[in-house]
Image: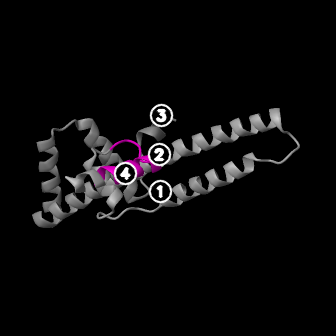
Amino acid sequence: MIEDVAEPVLRSGEDVEAILKIALRNEHGSVSELRERLARSADELGISPEALARAEEQYRTEAKIDKYMAARQAGFRASLVTYGAVTILLNVIYTLTMFGRFYWPGIVLAAFGVAVATHWNEIRQRPSLTDRKFQFWLESGEPSTVGTDSDEWADKEARKRLER
C-alpha cells in the first residue's frame, strides 16, 4: 500500500506541473534564485528574454484580474448573505403580524432579488484592463471585497479627483 503512494501516477502535463510547483515551493528559493531558474528554463525552451518578459507581465496582469474577480465574488457573497437575512427577518415579521393577508415582503424581496441577480450577472464578467471599476480597484490598494457600495464610493472618489 505504501509503495503505491511512493510512486506517483503521472497522467498529464498538469500532474507534472503540479509536482514541480510543489518542489519549487519546498525549495524556498529566494526571488533572485527563482528568477534565475525561470530565465534558465526559458532559455532551454528557446524562449527569448523579451517573450519571457511579456509572458511574465501577462501573468501578473491575469493574477491581478483573478484577485479582483475573487474580491467581487466576496462582495457578492456578502450581498447574498444579507439577502438571506433580510428574507428571514421580513418573513418572521410578516408571520407574526399579518399572516394570511397581503404578502408585502414579496415586493421588497423581489426588488432586492433583482439587485442581487444584477450583481451576480456583473461579477461573472471578466473585466478588461481599461475597465473603470478594475482601474479604481487597483488604485485603491486592491481591497479584499468589491460590492455595489464600493462602486458608488468609487464614483464619488472619481468626481472628487476631477474637481481638484
Q: What residue does disc 1 label? A: 123
Q: What residue does disc 2 label? A: 75
Residue 153 magenta-highlighted: yes
Image coords of residue 94 (percent x, y): 78, 38
Instruction: Say which amino acid is labelled 3.
Output: Ile
Instruction: Say which amino acid is labelled 2.
Output: Gly
Q: What residue does disc 4 label? A: 68
Tell me the mark number nearer the camera, choosing from 1 and 3.
1
Give the magenta-colored segment's residue range: 143-158
Q: Do the residues bearing badges 1 and 2 touch, measured as CB atoms within 8 Å? A: yes
Q: What residue does disc 3 label? A: 2
Image coords of residue 93 (percent x, y): 75, 35
How packed mark 2 is, by other alpha carbons closer than 10 Å (few <14, some 14-19, many 20 or more), is many
> What secondary structure characterizes most of the magenta part?
helix
Which circle's residue, 4 or 3, is located before the other in the chain?
A: 3
Tell me the mark number nearer the camera, choosing from 4 and 3.
4
Instruction: Say which amino acid is labelled 1.
Output: Ile
Which circle's residue, 4 or 2, is located before the other in the chain?
A: 4
Image coords of residue 119 (percent x, y): 52, 55
Task: Between residue 91 and residue 137, name the one nearer to us.
Answer: 91
Q: Count how many numbered circles sit on residues in the image.
A: 4
Which circle's residue, 1 or 3, is located before the other in the chain?
A: 3
Q: CA distance from mark 1 to mark 2?
A: 9 Å
